[in-house]
Amino acid sequence: MVSARLASIQESTTLKISAMAKKLTASGLDIIDMGVGEPDFDTPKHIVEAGCNSIQMGETHYAPTGGIPELRQTIAEKLSRENRVPAGAEDVIVTPGAKMAVFASVQALLQEGDECILIGPSWVSYEPSVAFAGGSVLWGKVDENF
């Protein structure tokens, strides 16, 4: 038995679209899959080598929950220098992608019954994230000039 909240989660539209694209590709059609958002090229060689070197150096354990301290510091410096956003490493959290960052932010900020304004087009997981937090979505109307 699972919680009502977990049972309320619908199948991922993104994964459904990608599965459909893979099926159509396998049938011989020329399909451009824009569902998951993965690049259509392999990881560049220098990044693969850096990953392999990291593993060979024993960097195979869980990273700190908020992110590797040196990475957080580098991001904070970039924000301060290039974006003029005063930030220290303690103000930065590293997530395994923007989708997780949005999900965590929504869960942290919304209370049961809160309303959240979204504008489209938006990523298909934003509305379910709000629903999972117990909120509801109000869709803002925008024109081509916002």
Image (tube, rainbow, N blue to C red):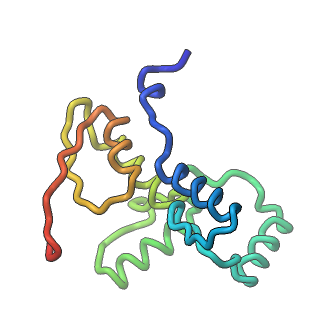
Q: Please state the horizontal and vertical placement of residue 62, each as a whole percent of the image.
A: 68, 51
Of all residues, the one furthest to the right in this rendering is 56
| Image quarter of the C terminus | bottom left
How many numbered circles are shown? Answer: 0
* Foreground pick, 117 / 63: 117
* Foreground pick, 8 / 50: 8
| Image quarter of the N terminus | top right
| Residue under the point 75% across and 71% down | 51
Image side of residue 78 versus residue 49, left or right: left
Q: Is residue 42 above or below residue 35?
A: below
Q: Please state the horizontal and vertical placement of residue 139, each as a whole percent of the image.
A: 19, 51
Image side of residue 139 versus residue 126, left or right: left
| Residue under the point 43% across and 62% down | 92
Q: Please state the horizontal and vertical placement of residue 41, each as a whole percent of the image.
A: 66, 78
| Residue under the point 49% across and 45% down | 12
- Residue 121, quarter of the rendered image: bottom left
* Foreground pick, 23 / 102: 23
| Residue under the point 35% across and 69% down | 87
Q: Please state the horizontal and vertical placement of residue 52, each as a whole percent of the image.
A: 81, 71
